[in-house]
Image (cartoon, helix red, strand yellow):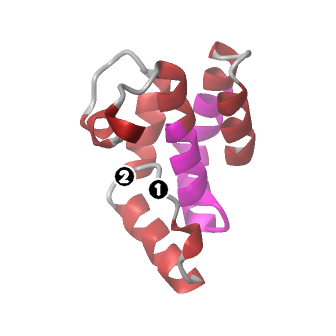
């Protein structure tokens, strides 16, 4: 799923994942989903909830921020694209919208 981490892969595979994700427009899609959480999107439909349970809005936002963090971590081109595309603002807006949600705050901090 979108939130699955490539961190257990080798560094070459992780960099390839980051490049493919960036080139496919995933960074922009995540940013838009963070900024418009009530608007249905194909991206949100691809995030699979655990154990078949519907994913709460809080968990969805945390999952999206974790995916964004995975894509940009240690990858300068992806970091630049996310910053220029409003990624920092999207993460901050989301963190402000869910101030009591520990998972959102943790994932947002990782993404920043």
Which residue, given by chain and number where applicable, does mark 1 sit on?
A: 4
Residue situated furthest front in the rendering: 51
Whole-number angstrom distance, CA of label 1 to CA of label 2:
5 Å
Question: Please, is residue 37 above or below residue 84 in the view?
Answer: above
Q: Secondary structure at mark 1?
A: loop
Which residue, given by chain and number where applicable, does mark 2 sit on?
A: 1
Q: Count neighbours of disc 2 (C-alpha within 10 A) and say few if under 14, some if 14 to 19, many if 20 or more.
A: few
Left or right of 44 on screen, residue 13: right
Question: Please, is residue 12 above or below residue 7 in the view?
Answer: below
Left or right of 42 on screen, residue 9: right
How far across and down, in percent of the image, does residue 13 sit?
A: 48, 80
> Chief secondary structure of the magenta span?
helix
Question: In the depicted view, which residue is nearer to us: 41 or 6?
Answer: 6
Question: In the depicted view, which residue is nearer to us: 85 or 25?
Answer: 25
In contact (CB < 8 Å): disc 1 and disc 2: yes
Q: Tell me if residue 81 can be seen.
A: yes
- Looking at the rendering, the stretch of residues picked out in magenta corresponds to 63-92
What residue is rendered at 48% in x and 24% in y? 35
Q: Secondary structure at mark 2?
A: loop
Does residue 88 show up magenta in the picture?
A: yes
């Amino acid at each position: 799923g979108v939130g699955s981490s490539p961190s257990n892969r080798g560094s070459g595979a992780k960099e390839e994942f980051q490049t493919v994700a960036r080139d496919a427009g995933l960074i922009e899609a995540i940013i838009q989903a963070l900024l418009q959480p009530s608007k249905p999107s194909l991206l949100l439909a691809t995030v699979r909830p655990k154990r078949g349970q519907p994913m709460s809005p809080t968990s969805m936002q945390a999952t999206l921020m974790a995916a964004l963090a995975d894509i940009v971590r240690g990858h300068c081109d992806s970091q630049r694209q996310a910053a220029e595309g409003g990624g920092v603002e999207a993460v901050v807006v989301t963190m402000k919208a869910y101030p009591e949600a520990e998972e959102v705050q943790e994932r947002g901090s990782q993404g920043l």
